[in-house]
Amino acid sequence: MADALRTDLPGIGRYRRLAAVDVLDPKLTGVEKFTRSRWLWTSVVVLLMGVFSLVRLRVILTADIKTDAGTVPGLNSDALWQSASYAFPTLAVWSLLFLAVDRWKPQRWLLWALAIFWGGSVAAYGSIVVNSWAAERLSIDQNGNQLSGARAAIYVAPFVEEFFKATVIFLVAFLDRRRLTSKLSLISLAGLSAIGFAFSENIVYFARAIVYGSMTASTGDVAKAVAQLVQMRGLWTSFGHPLFTSMTAMGLAIGLRSRAKVVRVVAPIAGYLSAALLHMSFNTVASLFPDSYQKMIYFTIALPVLAAVALYAVFQVIREGRLIRYRLSDYVMAGWVPDTYPLLFSKVIQRARMLALSPWWGNAVATYRLQRAVSELAYLRDQITRGTVDAAGLWRERELLFAIRDQKAAGALDDARGLKPYWKKPQPAYALAWQPPSYPGPAGIGGQFPAPVAVLPPLGSAPTQSVVDPRWGPPKA
């Protein structure tokens, strides 16, 4: 352990990266830190992959398909943009919910954006390509719409879509698992990827309904049919994809927090299979059962499962607060953090008060960084006590303690109890050369003349005696 704490050993950087506690050298400049960040180049690669996926999606969806019965028209730009406006409210609401879940140590906005972008572009493109290929091999449908068959939706789509949606959280875990501090972080990223995927999928479904209704005379009221589809997919069943992918996230979280190698391998696989099984059950009911039976299953099975997952998320929020309080108490006993930290930093309301009042009583940026450092310190302590982080974690622990000290010196607010916002009033100016009056004299209280300035001897000089008349003396005999 002593060797692990030395910084002059060769290969210490790789050792810390394997322990998931690697940080950039503080001696580097801002430009060097930016260019050496692994997430910068990961973002560039994901961006290029996403743009390519979106272009290919547009080519696939807008192309006409020739069949024996005729030509199936592709989706036009007007239908796609109209469908995007219908699908956006669902994306916005669910994104806000998943961002609100990850509150104790929120992920960087970059990871949130990457998760949504991955789900809506790379995952959507990969799923439609693999699903189409598998449907063609199964020869499910001969009318040019291979994805409309029930067997493809039941046996192929669940495994393919859950794989592509969950790839982003495995990518984050592979590159930097230090960022995945809790189950809430993983559920948040998985949910964002899933809702991004659902956004693209809803656009395709809505656009197909619009184009098909406009091309078929027997459709009836096209606007009403599209409105019903938007209500069904955008509201009543909008929880489907986030719920399924959350199963994979919970399995991965269990694996990351376990010391047993078997659990680290089995838990993510079990989570993925659970997600695919739920997805398969959902598609089976939607494809094979009548509407009346679907409503019964919806209210008796689907909604209870959703309520159970929501209660689990609430329980995790409470549990994470307790974990932060218990682990910070270890540092209080060691004398490294104030004794008020476990209580204040384990309550969402107190943390929100710190951030809200920091512009008046401190520094807002320093307060935000202080909260992140304290939260990461508590989670790191939990990993150390579990044995999932080796001696290299002690270096990260020391760096976080130094970061807490530096943010305090920068004006971070760590206790907002009893504080309120206020309006800063201009202070009256005072004359700096004003001298107090000397008494007695004509300038005393109510005097008419300036008070004489007392002349003081130089600082450090010996006291002087007053001049005495030499003729004065005791009476002569």
Image (cartoon, rainbow, N blue to C red):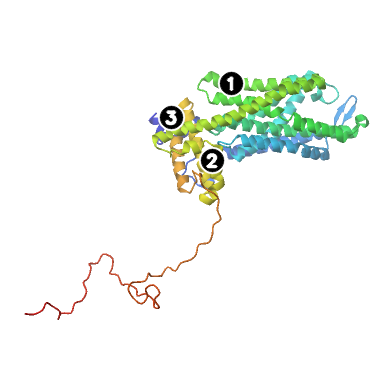
Q: Which residue position holds label 3? A: 391
Residue 164 placed where, x, y %?
A: 67, 28
Q: Picture quarter containing residue 173?
A: top right
Residue type at mark 1?
A: Ala
Q: Which residue position holds label 2? A: 350
Residue 428 placed where, x, y %?
A: 49, 64
Looking at the image, residue 429 lies above or below residue 196: below
Residue 202 placed where, x, y %?
A: 77, 32
From the image, state whether disc 3 or disc 1 is nearer to you.
1
Q: Which residue position holds label 1? A: 267
What distance separates the C-alpha of mark 2 from that of mark 1? 35 Å
Residue type at mark 2?
A: Gln
Q: Callout 3: 10 Å neighbours few (<14), some, many (20+)? A: some
Report the number of discs: 3
Question: Which quarter of the rendered picture does the N terminus lie within?
Answer: top left
SS at circle 2? helix
What distance separates the C-alpha of mark 3 from that of mark 2? 33 Å
SS at circle 3? loop
Pointers 3 and 2 in contact (C-beta within 8 Å): no
Q: Which residue lies furthest to the right in this view?
A: 217
Question: Which quarter of the rendered picture does the C terminus lie within?
Answer: bottom left
